Image: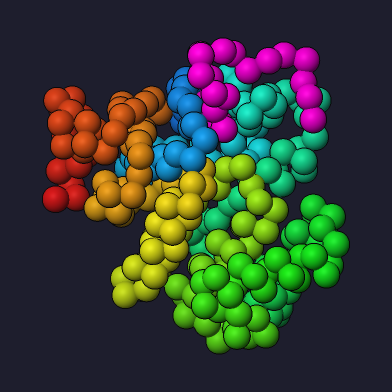
Amino acid sequence: MSTTTRVPETGGETPVLRLDQVRKSYGGNEVLKGISFDIKPHETVALLGPSGSGKSTLMKCINLLERVNDGQIWLGDTDITDPRVNRDQCRSRIGVVFQQFNLFPHMNVLKNVTLGAIKVHGVPKDQARERALELLDRIGMKQKAGAYPDQLSGGQQQRVAIVRSLMTDPELLLLDEITSALDPMLVGEVLEMVSELTDKGTTILMATHEMSFAHHAADRIVLLLNGVIAENGTPREVMDESENPKTKEFFSHFR
Ligand code: ADP
Ligand code: MG
């Protein structure tokens, strides 16, 4: 797809994602007050911030589940906030996993993983099946292809949800607090899968409260406080070295 305008140049390669002065309000509540940042190819960016700071809202704007009130969001060289854009086509370029496992309880793993790819994104059935089994095999869950969600642990369900999000080879993966609803014992296996994706060069934006994971796995930290970006830097710059009192106050809760 092409649009009439071009993504603004900053020199270097085109970012996978560019947010330019994104604003979003619910009624009189301005949640996002002009958010701008880029994600470069193969980067893993951790989106941090207190509950209610707008992380999920931002993710929903990127995934076109919410419309921005102002500003632009570029996916590669597509301005996805352009009203003329093909929303389904944009969505198929982005993989999304939410906090709650949203697997359909009445469908087995294989069906859950392939359904969206087949019905929404038009992937031929055989091809979807083959791809799903290959991805499940990679995480050691091929033998669970016929299992139903309630026969899996929460961690396994969430890993299946990640597999599902990878079916269309998305340019960007959005992970919204994907371990927050898990039994602490099951967090590790899910984060390990994220780590593997990070190592393979998947481009990821992840909202999380897992600070030590963000510190070692993220290339960059974006900290959202009161609707604005308080920090955008390496984990070390933001988590260890920032002199911003609000930043320090935020991280003090996790020590
Ligand atoms: P986070 O994911 O960082 O916890 P959210 O993006 O869920 O934050 O919420 C940010 C703010 O937006 C909160 O004040 C929340 O109440 C508000 N909000 C989120 N979704 C809606 C909605 N659909 N309608 C009205 N207000 C909303
Ligand atoms: Mg949230």
Res. 224 in view: yes
Compared to 188, does 4 lie above or below?
A: above
Q: Which residues are magenta?
A: 1-20
| Apparent side of residue 53 relative to residue 71 in the rendered image (left or right) | left
**Residue 224 pos. (x, y %):** 36, 33
Residue 54's image quarter? top left
The residue drawn where x is 60% and y is 21% is 72
Judging depth in this view, the residue of 51 and 130 nearest the camera is: 130
Compared to 149, does 175 lie above or below?
A: above
Q: Quadrant of the N terminus?
A: top right
The residue drawn where x is 70% and y is 53% is 168
**Residue 10 pos. (x, y %):** 51, 13
The residue drawn where x is 34% and y is 28% is 232
**Residue 158 pos. (x, y %):** 51, 67
Res. 52 in view: no
Compared to 70, does 103 lie above or below?
A: below
How many labels, in total?
0
